[in-house]
Image (spheres, rainbow, N blue to C red):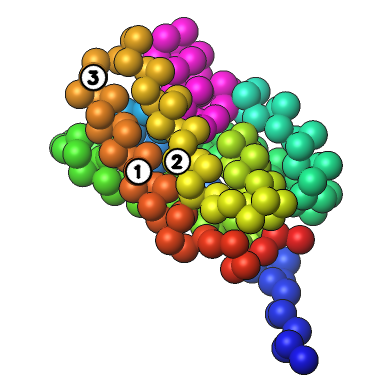
Amino acid sequence: MKPAIAQHTPIENLQALLIGTLLVALSVSMFKQAGLLSGGTAGLAFLAHYLGGMPFSLAFFLFNLPFYWLAWKYMGRTFTFRTFVAVLLFSVETDLLPRWLSFATLDSTLAAILGGALLGNGFLILFRHKASLGGVGILALVLQERRNWRAGHIQMAVDAAIVAAALLTVPWPRVALSILGAVVLNFVLATNHRPGRYVVQ
């Protein structure tokens, strides 16, 4: 008989939402400073920010709205609620963090590597507490649970396509570094969030 899986407490879930979203918000601050993009819904929000001047936090919140139906149908109410809270927290944090933190010097290559690593670890924390930051993350988790595909591989393919689309508007050196960041992010997910581990129920 398999031992019972210990459930996270409400306090543990709350700290995961706060710390996970803060790590991702910090990575977004680094990407903004270096003029880089990320993949997924955040990548679309970056494009809306760079092209149309829309606030990143607002664009990110709006682009996530259609994915809540997918989360509700396939991942359940708990996952959907926690994801909504995580997206709301992240949207607020990305607005507030620049008021408290700035980078006098930030190498673009370091921003891509360290920012990608922070993104990956932030997502891992959220995934392991039955939450996400919506968008492609929800789709990747659904396919991992339903089809046994690795979430990191799914996200990497989608992220590469979104970042590559930025070639139409963003100089190619910044796009290349953005792809590097996406590879680091999804390497973290592919090696640390495999099917059969930390299954979202």
Give the position of the N terminus as an image quadrant: bottom right
Give the position of the C terminus as an image quadrant: bottom right
Amino acid, disc 2? Met
Q: Between 61 and 156, which is closer to the camera in this rendering?
A: 156
The circle on residue 156 is 2
What residue is rendered at 28% in x and 39% in y?
180
On the image, numbered disc 3 is attached to which residue? 172
* Mark 1 or 2, nearer chain start: 2
What residue is rendered at 20% in x and 24% in y?
173
Task: Work out how far the residue at label 3 is from the one at label 1, CA to CA, in angstroms.
Answer: 16 Å
Task: Work out how far the residue at label 2 is from the one at label 3, CA to CA, in angstroms.
Answer: 19 Å
Q: Residue 48 appears at what percent x and percent y? A: 48, 15
Q: Secondary structure at mark 2?
A: helix
Q: Quadrant of residue 30?
A: top left
Residue 52 falls inside the magenta stretch: yes
What residue is rendered at 31% in x and 32% in y?
178
Q: Residue 161 appears at what percent x and percent y? A: 44, 26
Side of 15 relative to 176 (left or right): right
Q: Between 118 and 189, which is closer to the camera in this rendering?
A: 189
- Circle 1 crowding by C-alpha within 10 Å: few under 14, some 14–19, many from 20: many
Q: Is residue 97 visible?
A: no
Residues at circles 3 and 1 in contact by the CB criterion of under 8 Å: no
On the image, numbered disc 1 is attached to which residue? 183
What residue is rendered at 48% in x and 47% in y?
153
Amino acid, disc 1? Val
Q: Residue 97 appears at what percent x and percent y? A: 43, 38
Q: Secondary structure at mark 3?
A: helix
Amino acid, disc 3? Trp
Side of 111 relative to 200 (left or right): left
* Mark 2 or 3, nearer chain start: 2
Q: Secondary structure at mark 1?
A: helix
Q: State which region is magenta.
A: 39-60
